[in-house]
Each structure stands twice: as structure tokens, then as C-alpha cells.
């Protein structure tokens, strides 16, 4: 298994992760990273990580903006400021990923909260919202090419687990990110359907978020402490893809929970 670690653009977090010599480094961006000074700092952070010999770098679009999730389906007329933020940061990250030969990660959707219901209601039904999501993902795919990837959600707008939905996602030829816990939670803790989804989408997945869950809430547990059957999951991962451990940390300046997850998989022989 690759050692993939995640941090913000904070120098303290970055240096904590780098002491363990990860193979993959994911930078979770936030609103301050998109001021002129923030973008400059973010680029310096990317270059600093690259100077340590790490070539697999993923830039994660901000999750939140002023109390809302950065939903890709955000209606422009009802939420003009949020729409501007979501689209502008997506374009800025794609440009930065291309310039630094990194990867940009965009969420197809989130968890059905933080403004989601109001956004969904603007479309009348889920089918219309999904059509808008796919259309915007197509635009970003055309813009970013091999430097942009799209992560699955817990909300039904862009969730894995339904074979028919997955067939439509495959038809669009999106480069996918699979958060294993998101699939597990969306399927109410069903390991058999989780495995089926990972097998079905395997050739389209370029990056994984490895994180455990009890399957009831978005709990982001260290691997081995939830109910995901990792001995069935790991053999189904695309060997050409990158991976990181996206675990809730007690201390953002100490990634011990991520390291413990890696060690757990090592004890299973991976």
C-alpha cells in the first residue's frame, strides 16, 4: 500500500506529514487559500512538497463557504456568491494542478446538508439536479483533462452504489475518486454492495480515500475501527490509482491516526 497523507496548506501540518516520507500528499484547501496571497502560498506549498521528491499531489477543493457546502449543483440565481466561489475555486485549482503537474479533486456533491435541500428544491427533482451536476462535471473534465478528478458523495446527486447510476457515470468517462466510507455509508453499511461498487468502477477510479465507518454516520474512523471489510476491499482497488488516509485527527499537527490506519493494513499483509 502507498502511504498517502492529508494536510491543509498550513506549514505545521505539511512538515508533520513530510517527516514520514509519504508517497501521496493531498492538500485540503480552504477559503483563505484563494486570496492572491493564499494562492501564492498554496503554490509554494505544492513546490515545497515536490522538492521532497513527492510527485503524487492532490489538491482538494474547499468543502465549505460561509456555512454552505461547496455543492456543484448550486443554483446561480438563488446563490450567486456561493456559485461564484464554487466555480472560481474549481477553475483556479485546475489551473494550478496543470501548472504544477498535480491533480485537482472536485466533489460531485456532499452529504445532503448545509443548504443542500434548498439547492435541490430549485431543480424540482433529483433527476434535474443530477443532469446539472453531470453537465458541470463534463465542463470541468474538458477544462482539466488528466489533471481533474471527481469524488463521490453521500447525497444521491453523485453517489456510488447504484449500478445504473454508476453506468451513467462511466458513460461520461469521468476520472473518479472513491471515498470508501462514503460508499459504505450510502449503502447503509452493506459490505457486499460496497465491494460490487468498487469492482464495477475500478477501471475509472484514479484516487481513493481510505477511511473506516460504522455505516450510520459520516464518522471518518481509523481503518480497523469500523465495519468495513478491508480484506475484501483492498484487493479490488485499482493498482494504478493513488490512495490517502482521510481520517479525523485529534490534533491536526499530528497525523498519528493516518499512520495507524496504514499500519493496520500492513498487519493484513497489504
Image (tube, grey):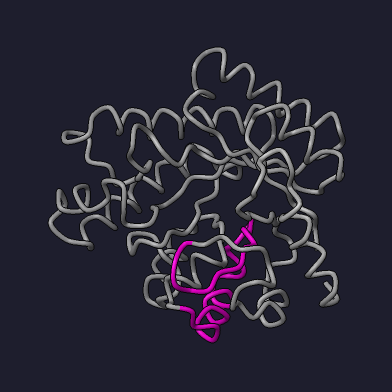
| Magenta run includes residue 203 | yes
| Residue 170, above or below 98 | below
Please name the residue shown 44% across and 72% down the image: 216
Q: Nearer the viewer, residue 12 or 185?
A: 12
Q: Tell me if 132 is positioned left or right of 203 in this view.
A: left
Q: Nearer the viewer, residue 28 or 66?
A: 66
Classify the position of the C terminus by image quarter.
bottom right
| Magenta run includes residue 132 | no
Q: Quadrant of residue 226 in the image?
A: bottom right
Classify the position of the N terminus by image quarter.
bottom right
Q: Nearer the viewer, residue 163 or 221?
A: 221
Q: Residue 18, position in %: x, y?
A: 82, 38
Please name the residue shown 28% across and 27% down the image: 81
Q: Tell me if 128 is positioned left or right of 203 in this view.
A: left
Q: Tell me if 132 is positioned left or right of 142 in this view.
A: left
Q: Residue 211, position in %: x, y?
A: 62, 63
Q: Which residues are magenta?
A: 189-218
Q: Tell me if 228 is positioned left or right of 270 in this view.
A: left
| Residue 193, above or below 221 | below
Amino acid at each position: 500500500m502507498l502511504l498517502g497523507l492529508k494536510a491543509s496548506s498550513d506549514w505545521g501540518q505539511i512538515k508533520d506529514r513530510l517527516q514520514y516520507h509519504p508517497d501521496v500528499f493531498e492538500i485540503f484547501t480552504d477559503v483563505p487559500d484563494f486570496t492572491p496571497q493564499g494562492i501564492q502560498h498554496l503554490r509554494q506549498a505544492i513546490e515545497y512538497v515536490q522538492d521532497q521528491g513527492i510527485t503524487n499531489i492532490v489538491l482538494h477543493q474547499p468543502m465549505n463557504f460561509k456555512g454552505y457546502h461547496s455543492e456543484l449543483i448550486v443554483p446561480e440565481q438563488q446563490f450567486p456568491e456561493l456559485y461564484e466561489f464554487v466555480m472560481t475555486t474549481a477553475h483556479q485549482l485546475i489551473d494550478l494542478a496543470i501548472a504544477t503537474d498535480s491533480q485537482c479533486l472536485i466533489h460531485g456533491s456532499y452529504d445532503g446538508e448545509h443548504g443542500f435541500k434548498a439547492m435541490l428544491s430549485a431543480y424540482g427533482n433529483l433527476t434535474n439536479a443530477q443532469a446539472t451536476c453531470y453537465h458541470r462535471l463534463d465542463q470541468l473534465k474538458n477544462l482539466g483533462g488528466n489533471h481533474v478528478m471527481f469524488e463521490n458523495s453521500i447525497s444521491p446527486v453523485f453517489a456510488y452504489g447504484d449500478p445504473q447510476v454508476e453506468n451513467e457515470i462511466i458513460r461520461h468517462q469521468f476520472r473518479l475518486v472513491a471515498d470508501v466510507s462514503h460508499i459504505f455509508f450510502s449503502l447503509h453499511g452493506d459490505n457486499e454492495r460496497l465491494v460490487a461498487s468498487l469492482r464495477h468502477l475500478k477501471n475509472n477510479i484514479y484516487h481513493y480515500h481510505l477511511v473506516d465507518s460504522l455505516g450510520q454516520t459520516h464518522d471518518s474512523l481509523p481503518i480497523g475501527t469500523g465495519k468495513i471489510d478491508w480484506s475484501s476491499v483492498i484487493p479490488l482497488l485499482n493498482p494504478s490509482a493513488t490512495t490517502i488516509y482521510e481520517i479525523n485527527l485529534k490534533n491536526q499537527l499530528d497525523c498519528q491516526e493516518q499512520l495507524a490506519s496504514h499500519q493496520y493494513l500492513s498487519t493484513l499483509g497489504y
